[in-house]
């Protein structure tokens, strides 16, 4: 108050002007404006200056550049910098010092663009870490706003692990490192991965230096392939091979693990430089064989699932990680060579009998044919010699036909036992594979599990009848059905075939008989045991000629005999005449006495 008392009143104060709102000082208005302007910054349009954020809301940022009015900038121009706050210094571009409303028009985006090229080049040279805003996706990567420049971020440079969804990065502000600049085309390439790798490299060195076999570490599933799973151990990768994921069979690693899953793994092995690290997952749990029922023994029945098929057999999983092999020979009592796929397929649930069990070697063999009785145990009772059955043709050989009467009971029909009459060169001429054929049991070989069978024995032996029909010397009409070097095959009545050598095929006129020619043939040999009939056409007219010649000789001989007899009779007559004369003479002499 004392200070106020010492202030002297202004003698020439204009109270009227004060009431009207005019200047109350003796200083002129122009002087006051000059004094005020001297306190403000000198700014020009299209100039970049630094300003201070003095206020901000969800849409706008108010920036003070020391001018008579503040500028308002859309918040979207600062999206690359989500940490912007009041008091921060920002660069702005003066578009207009005063618009129609007297408003200062500023732009942060244009300010950045004006200085951006210099800044980007400086960031590359100094390996500076910069911030950028990911605007959108593009082919092969992302577009990033860096200092107002649209830079390219390759997909491979986003992270050290493969990216499955690029869209989650759109709209994010991240730190980047400028890795390449094309000065001619003004292209900029940035990388976020480069920042991570630098950090991971240090972590990797620390982790690798502490690695030991048998060590259990926590990792994250980084990638899944057909042969295994890559695990990120915190900067260093290891591989769990598909065989080390589970004690059981695994066809696809995705059955056991999922991407980004965290799990414990054990270190199985690594190379000297520790660049390749082999990991295991199943090794963290006890082996299933160790937990197998101790009472399980050979002969027990078990159930399981077919997990692997091969031509030689099937692997059956009776418990996770515990498998047994059913060899194809243990699938059926049949001795035919067949594939295991004929009996079962992957995924089938089967019951089997334990044949062998080795807990030390962790091996087990199984069988399914043992679930049925061995048909050869009662073969004599079920298929006695002389019994008739229907069999299935399974295979051919040059000497016969292999057939199966029932599963596991096989037999052979020798080629000579197929037909009484036909000359069969190969069984395929008589039947076909897969066909049914009637058979008679001829002999049982239990030791070798084979039956000797016959087909022709179903009928009586026609050669007993043929023996009386095709007697040696009898003549029958026949047709030549096949010409061979050694002669011809001739079809005779009753389905019988005979054979004639070339010299017996000569006709009466000297020509040779031809194929399909029908001629009379004479039986010159009949062998019942060998089922052989030898024929001759030539013999018919040759024998006839011989018979005629013989008849002529006989006639001549008879004529000569008759002449001799006449002479003898004549002589006899003469002798008898003499006797009669003597007798008469005798009678005459006796009368005289």
Image (cartoon, helix red, strand yellow):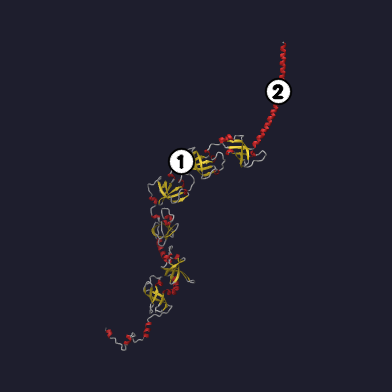
Q: Residue most toward the left?
A: 2
Secondary structure under badge 2? helix
Secondary structure under badge 1? helix
Occupied quadrant, residue 10:
bottom left
Disc on res. 569: 2
Work out whether 382 lies above or below 83: above
Residue sitting at x 44%, y 48%: 326
Residue 458 visible to the viewer? yes
Cα gap from disc 2 to disc 1, whole angstroms: 91 Å
Residue hosting label 1: 376
Mark positioned earlier in the residue sequence (2 or 1): 1
Locate residue 233, reporting x and y percent.
40, 60
Q: Quadrant of the N terminus?
A: bottom left
- Left or right position of 518 against 174: right
Of tags 2 and 1, the one toward the viewer is 2
- Residue neighbourhood size for the residue with mark 1, other residues' Cα within 10 Å, grouped as few (<14), some (14–19), many (≥20): some
Locate residue 48, reporting x and y percent.
42, 77
- Left or right position of 493 against 125: right
Work out whether 22 lies above or below 162: below
């Amino acid at each position: 108050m004392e200070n106020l008392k010492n202030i002297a009143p202004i003698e020439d104060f204009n109270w009227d002007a004060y009431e009207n709102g005019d200047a109350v000082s003796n200083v002129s208005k122009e002087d006051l404006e000059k004094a005020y302007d001297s306190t403000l910054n000198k700014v020009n349009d299209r100039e970049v200056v630094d300003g201070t954020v003095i206020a901000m809301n969800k849409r706008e940022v108010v920036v003070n550049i020391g001018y008579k009015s503040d500028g308002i900038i859309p918040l979207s121009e600062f999206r690359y910098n989500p940490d912007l706050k009041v008091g921060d210094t920002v660069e702005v571009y003066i578009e207009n010092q005063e618009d129609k409303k007297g408003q200062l028009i500023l732009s942060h985006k244009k300010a950045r663009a004006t200085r951006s090229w210099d800044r980007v080049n400086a960031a590359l040279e100094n390996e500076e870490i910069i911030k950028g805003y990911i605007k959108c996706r593009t082919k092969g990567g992302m577009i990033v706003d860096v200092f107002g420049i649209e830079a390219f971020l390759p997909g491979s440079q986003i992270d050290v692990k493969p990216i499955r969804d690029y869209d989650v990065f759109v709209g994010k502000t991240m730190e980047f490192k400028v890795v390449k600049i094309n000065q001619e085309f003004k292209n900029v390439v940035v990388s976020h991965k480069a920042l991570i790798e630098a950090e991971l490299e240090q972590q990797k060195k620390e982790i690798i230096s502490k690695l030991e076999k048998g060590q259990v570490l926590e990792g994250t599933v980084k990638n899944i392939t057909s042969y295994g799973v890559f695990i990120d151990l915190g900067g260093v990768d290891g591989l769990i091979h598909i065989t080390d994921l589970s004690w059981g069979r695994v066809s696809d690693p995705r059955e056991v693990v999922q991407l980004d899953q965290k799990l414990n793994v054990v270190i199985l092995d690594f190379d000297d430089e520790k660049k390749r690290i082999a990991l295991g997952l199943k090794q963290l749990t006890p082996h299933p064989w160790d937990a197998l029922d101790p009472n399980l023994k050979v002969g027990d029945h078990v159930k399981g699932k077919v997990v692997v098929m091969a031509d030689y057999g099937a692997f059956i999983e009776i418990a996770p990680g515990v498998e047994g092999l059913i060899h194809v020979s243990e699938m059926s009592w049949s001795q035919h060579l067949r594939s295991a796929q004929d009996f079962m397929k992957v995924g089938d649930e089967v019951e089997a009998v334990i044949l062998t069990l080795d807990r030390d070697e962790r091996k087990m063999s199984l069988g399914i044919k043992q679930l049925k009785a061995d048909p050869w145990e009662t073969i004599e009772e079920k298929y006695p010699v002389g019994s008739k059955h229907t069999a299935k043709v399974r295979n051919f050989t040059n000497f016969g036909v292999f057939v199966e009467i029932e599963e596991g009971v096989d037999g052979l029909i020798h080629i000579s036992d197929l037909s009484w009459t036909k000359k069969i060169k190969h069984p395929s001429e008589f039947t076909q594979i897969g066909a049914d054929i009637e058979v008679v049991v001829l002999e049982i070989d239990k030791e070798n599990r084979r039956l000797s069978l016959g087909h022709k024995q179903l009928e009586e032996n026609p050669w007993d009848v043929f023996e009386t029909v095709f007697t040696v010397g009898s003549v029958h009409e026949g047709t030549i059905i096949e010409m061979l070097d050694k002669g011809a095959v001739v079809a005779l009545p009753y389905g019988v075939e005979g054979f004639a050598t070339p010299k017996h095929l000569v006709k009466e006129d000297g020509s040779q008989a031809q194929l399909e020619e029908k001629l009379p043939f004479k039986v010159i040999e009949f062998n019942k045991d060998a089922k052989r009939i030898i024929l001759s056409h030539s013999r018919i007219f040759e024998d006839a000629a011989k018979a005629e010649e013989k008849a002529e000789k006989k006639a001549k001989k008879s004529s000569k005999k008759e002449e001799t007899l006449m002479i003898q009779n004549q002589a006899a007559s003469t002798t008898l005449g003499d006797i009669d004369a003597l007798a008469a003479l005798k009678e005459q002499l006796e009368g005289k006495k």
